[in-house]
Amino acid sequence: MLRRISSWSGRPLAALAAVLLLSGPQVLSAPNVAADGPPPLESIFGVWDANLSPGSPTWQFMVQSGARVVRTPFAWNLIETSPGNYDWSRYDGVFAELKKAGMTPLPIVSNAPAGFGYTPGVAICGPLTPKGLDAFERFMTAAMERYGSRSTITATRNSVVYWQIYNEADFYLKDLAAPDGDIGALGGGCLGNTTNPYNPSEGPTNWGPALYVEVLKRATNAKNAADPNAKIVFAALAADGCYDATKLDSHGRPLAVDDIAKNPFNCRFFAQVLDAGGAPYFDLAAFNSYLFYRWNHETPSAPGFLGKIERFRDVLRDAAVGSPNPALFNKPIAIVETGLAYGQDTRPCTLPNNTACVDFTPDDPALLVAPILAQSLQGHTAPGSGLAAPVDLVIWFALNTEKPTSAGDWGLVYQGKPTQAYLAYQYATSQLRGFAFLNDFGEATMTGGTRPVGGSEPCVGDPTKTRRCNSLQWLAFSRADGLQRHVIWVDSGYPREPHAWKYANVNGLYVATPLEREVGFPIVPGETLTVTSDIGVVLQPHRQESGYAYFKATHRAIFATIKPAAAQIGQNGGTVQYTPPPPSQGPNAPPPPPAFQGTFLPGSVPAGATIFIVNSGAPDQTPRNAPSLGAAFTLGCTTPSGEPCDLNGPATLTFDISQFANATGSYSLGLYKLVPGSGVSALSSDTWVKVGTLTCDTTTKKCTGAIASFGTFAVLDERSFTFIPLATDATRP
């Protein structure tokens, strides 16, 4: 039997403005950009494209995708054609057209010209000679002068803000004789080695990380000289393939191990660069993240895609401890490659007698688009406790491919045609732009510090029962006008498995059934609920019962948009009313929640302002997968132009508490306001502060009190120190 889940009791703080509810994918147009101003980066989402060609069909797909950043190679050796001579023609037109389109490039600086590096051939990244370091600084200075805020060329001024210094510099350099790109070189001269491969007798010296610090210093020198507005982005680190699942850290994650004979990457590289004094010389930490490696990183508080974000935050936190300047380690994070990765050993395709595993298709990445973008936005607007470190960029790999690689890197556009993944990406960027993370209502995929457990079942073929399949993931986002957007999907639990199947062993055969869960939303007077597929097709509830609308969720995400109960306040003031949904039916059902209203006198808010009320979850900080009382509510205000507004005069709240007034005479309730914290989970470090008193009269069956500002509130019966429930439980039978 499917578990039925209502969003109500965890229903978060409401969202901001009205949203287009589409019956199909939305085609986005680029914003207008001033001729010499930087493109407005109103979105954290981007794509990778190595062959930018203005005016081409692929270019138009990129501009209309909703991406606002494009990551692309910036080959030093193709620009500095001879020492001190730079040919910018390959990039001038491309960067100028990106600026016109309202997009920001993220150039990956790499490929030193011959003679500037130690490694044979042309190194993608790696140790530079002293002569090479000097040349690199001159090159970066010239590039920033041409494309930065001080450029004398109008077309390219402010066209580039971000500069990424190398890609996957944590590759070990293994074979000095191997040409660039050879499997023996594993990256062609990168910097993962801590022992000098040219002189191993020196012993461990933090060789590669220390050399990378020197490269970052030279990039920072160029920034200081040519464009103080530039942002230096750390090399995109792979930081995978080198963990020991039998040894866990205090967060329950596998520890990194050093074994250059077996591992392609040095997973300690980032920490070693910080140890070598690199923190002052970059502005954004950066890494590549594919869910194939999720089990190396996720924890109970940071499932799935959030796990690697938290691992890097932990490295920054650890480095800040004891530092005389801990603010140096408060770096934003850029996820500069993500998408679908799989290979020949994909599970459960390797299970015997498995007829469900079919050939992969260009549409398969659609299954991960909305989950990855949603969790990235969660990491952007719900930074880790004690450290901001928000996710400021997330780049999908890749925009376009003609043929997938052995790793399965399908593009959003395949052989010149948009795929289901492209439509999902375009729709997700349109639906998430302008929203902030509100709450996580999904099931826990693990508890404790040893590996996943939770409301889902163990995956087939996992004798340790550490992985969980068929778990429901449910993220909620909001905007200032009370509008909420929920992203819901079913997690298969297999990091490389893109197909939406659940597996069971029946008489020695593996039988697959589609992943499917049922989710329910309460039908609330005054609210509007619209549910769509991940490409914008409006969905109808598959059933309605006892005041709830139920929808089916699968491995392809669904979007639910909730427009809250609201009222427009005129010159003479006005009132907004809220009637919660009915509780579950049955002999043991709780009493109905109390209705309440806010009354605003003339002048208390701008005339024409919209006041909204929504339920916002529970103030008791229950686990994200547990039922809660749903005691908190949000009272908000937006001006006629859509901007947030606050109180400028008296306002009152009145509660109808007839079902709770068991006492006689008068008593009072405490009104508490939420002071948000900064944890990954919305309520992980929030505090509640008493801001008022509601006077209750059991004769009139009402409680009334004044409020001084908008926000998220809860009402506490201070006789019993219990919160007054304003909604029903999250889980219904």
Image: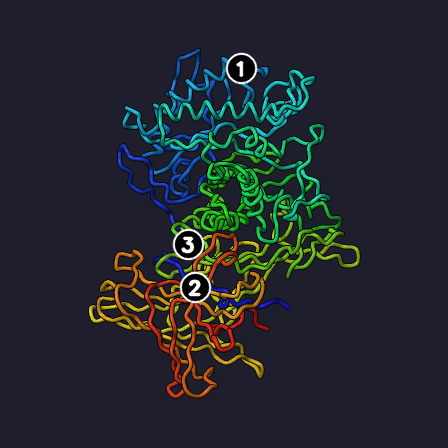
In the picture of the structure, the residue carrying the numbered disc 3 is 24
Disc 2 or 3, which lies upstream in sequence? 3
Q: CA distance from mark 2 to mark 3?
A: 44 Å
What number is the disc on residue 366? none
Q: How many marks?
A: 3
- What is the residue that sits farthest to the left in this orientation? 571
Residue 591 visible in this rendered orientation of the protein: yes
Which is nearer the N-term, disc 2 or disc 1?
A: 1
Which of the pair 57/527 is nearer the observer? 527
Kind of residue at disc 2: Val
User: In what element is the residue under mark 3?
Assistant: loop
**Residue placed under numbered mark 2 in the picture:** 689
Q: How is the image coloured?
A: rainbow
Q: Which residue is mark 1?
A: 129
Dot 2 falls on a residue whose secondary structure is strand
Neighbour tally class for label 1: few under 14, some 14-19, many 20 plus, Cα within 10 Å: some
Type of residue at label 3?
Gly
What residue appears at the point 50 percent right and 15 percent down from the top-left corner? 132
Circle nearer the viewer, 2 or 1: 2
